[in-house]
Image (cartoon, helix red, strand yellow):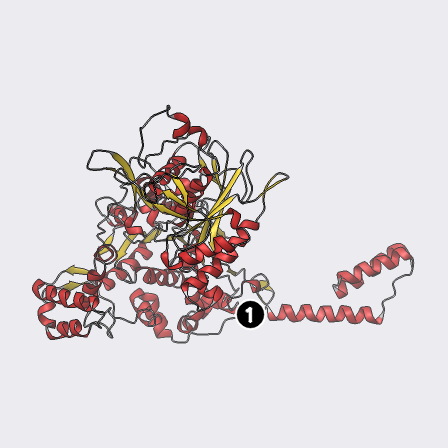
Amino acid sequence: MTDRAQLLALLDEVEEHDDLALLESRIAQIEAGTGLVVSRADKMRAASSNAQKAATRCSQDIGLPPDGLADPERRRQSDESLLFHLKTYHRETFRCEFSPDHVRIIGQIQRTIEDGGCKAIALMRSGGKSSILVRAIIWAVLTRRRRFVSMFSATADEAKKQMTNLRKVLLTNPMIQADYAHELHALISLGGRSTLAEGQHVNGKKTNVVWQKGMIASGHVDGVLTNEFVITCGSLLGGMRGQQYLATTGETIRPDLVLVDDPQTRASAASKNATKKRLDIVNGDCLKLAGGERKVAAFAAVTIIRRGDLADQMVDRSKSRHWRGEKIPAIKTFPSNTGLWNEFEELYGFELDADLPHDKSTKFVAENFKAMHEDAELFWTDNFDRSLFQSALHGLMVQKLDDADSFNAEFQLSPTVAGGDESQLFVLDAEAIARRVSPFKRREVPEGCEILTAFIDVQNEFLPYVVMAFTMTGRGYVIDYGAFPDQMTPYFTKQSLTKTLTDEFGEISIADRVAMGLDELVNDLMTQEYYCGDRVYSIDKAGIDVGWKLVSHEVRRICRESVHRARLHPQQGKAYNAKSQHWQRIKGGKTRKTRGLNCAFYNPPKGQRGNQELLIDTNFWKTSFAESLSIPESSNRAVVLYNDTPSSHLMFGESCVSEKPIQKKDADGNQFIAWEAVNSGQIENDYWDGAVGCMALASTLGVFEKNSPKATASKGSKKRSYGASPLNIG
């Protein structure tokens, strides 16, 4: 047989068996001159491969959706009315009867979906605004009123959570799956497994279905009349322009429905600059996603955190008329009989102080029910815990007694704290700090740094830490930060921990689990190697917060007994002012010499052994750190973060605006700067404290000495600054 004939025979055989391994084997035979001899084993292997491929291909064929509808009349009413759809298909979510305000708002949502326009909604906590809007956009795409939905939240993680909730609705609602079987056929056939999407087909024609964390697409089945729709999610600060999707029919579709869900964080709500930036994005980029082909339908589910913040402006019709805002407090009109409610307050307070159940106060409301509810008007009278309260008003008044500030903000939508009240001493912006990055990677030591310090804060269920590298002139780099146990996400709160110390070590005492966590974290940090080219660095000193008395013995024991004890110090901060004893004068007025600024090493408390402990003036060092974040990034005294995306550093940035400086005077007229928590301490401040601790530790190793008061003040000078940093940062 000629070479050409052999080649043709080879191609025919490979085409018949569709086996790449067989092709390679035959080429080798031709090159060896052994000819084309097909062995029995080769034939069996090729047949098995073909059978497996055929079975896989067959399993990926989802077939046509069932004919007809499970309940045509129910489907017809659902297509016509969003209110009917919510009450019928989502009974488990909306167990309480909708209020008249709910019914009115749901009608407005339907009209906005059909005609386009904007609608911003602020309701009391658990008022149902997000749940209603998420299910409304599902209704919009299933009933063919809209095709491309874009959802945005304050952070990427929050957006993904919203998408997860939406996908659960589609996967777990049998009534929707039955009545909208054609529209959801390709999606439901995946069974929630994104890996099956690529090969899914009907009679050999791909459906092009998508099932991802950030996007779902319903796909298309030939011969079935459906609305091929797309739903995406993302961060408000992420890239959103130019979104489009190529449908199976070849048509390019753009977003025609936008949902903005809680577009601000507590930190951004406290910043005028951040509020303006987010409002510009919402009014600009979000509303222009549809292009000019169709008027977009845009919804915003907002929570007012501070007066004048983004949410407050969006629902204020005098400032954002086009958003047609709805702002409905939980108690629209308070009851007129204040005397009885005052008696209830006294009785309720007595029960709290005496650690008694609230039986008597609850009975008091029941006995005076009519009089105590006279003239009261509520947003949602059916929404209350019947096992605890006599009425919704009873429950709300208890919320008011427990935390008036929270009640005003979350239920009455009238926060007592004004937004954008940044101190003029320092203008710190969380998002600006998150973008304040160096070109160096995480755990990489920048050129010129000589000192590495770390600080571990101690919390009940996790241990946040910060690691910084310093030049001797005082330029600081945050080269690592995080938490133990690892939360596997760059943004979290104390209420949303994915893994706690209890999860890690079991149900043991707080002191024991903190000690076990510190043991592991200290070992990890102190053995970690940090690189600058070929040079290897390790942490020079680490401080551990010893301020929490419940675990102070364990902190001191670990610093005393650890194999890394030479580099460990218990550390505690104290806020000094002009009337306070000098930071170096401790223990009977005796001055202890220490290398460092506004900090002092001293022996552990009487009766306890251990390493020397570091006491720092927190007002001084918080001011110093704030100055380092306020000056240009190129300054030799600036602090910058390791190279990463702004969204990854957002939590660190928010932590740095968790406190604000207040200029104060004492009785003698001396000025000093004190730091106070922002918004009742609701923003986590752990990384802020960690960086402050790192800077104080670095000063004990000689950093900042060139510009310290000792170096710059003339001999014999008695002048002293309180709280305000004398580091001459610039």
Local secondary structure at mark 1: loop
The residue at 52%/57% (across/down) is 520
Up-down relation of residue 170 to residue 574 (above or below): below
For the image shown, how many numbered marks are present on the structure? Answer: 1
Quarter of the picture containing the C terminus is top left
Q: Quadrant of residue 72?
A: bottom left
| Front one among 276 and 715 | 715
Q: Amino acid at mark 1?
A: Ile
The 10 Å Cα crowd at callout 1, few under 14, some 14 to 19, many 20 or more, is some
Up-down relation of residue 581 to residue 486 (above or below): above
| Residue 237 seen in render | no
Q: Position of residue 711 (x, y in %)?
A: 42, 27
| Front one among 558 and 477 | 558
Q: Position of residue 584 (x, y in %)?
A: 36, 39
Instruction: From the image, tell me which residue sits under label 1.
Output: 62
The residue at 19%/61% (across/down) is 401
| Residue 19 seen in render | yes
Q: As drawn, is 335 to the left or to the right of 628?
A: left
Up-down relation of residue 73 to residue 452 (above or below): below
| Front one among 336 and 182 | 336
| Front one among 437 and 597 | 597
Q: Position of residue 128 (x, y in %)?
A: 30, 63
Q: As drawn, is 96 to the left or to the right of 488?
A: left
Q: As drawn, is 137 to the left or to the right of 674?
A: right
Quarter of the picture containing the N terminus is bottom right
Q: Position of residue 355 (x, y in %)?
A: 23, 69
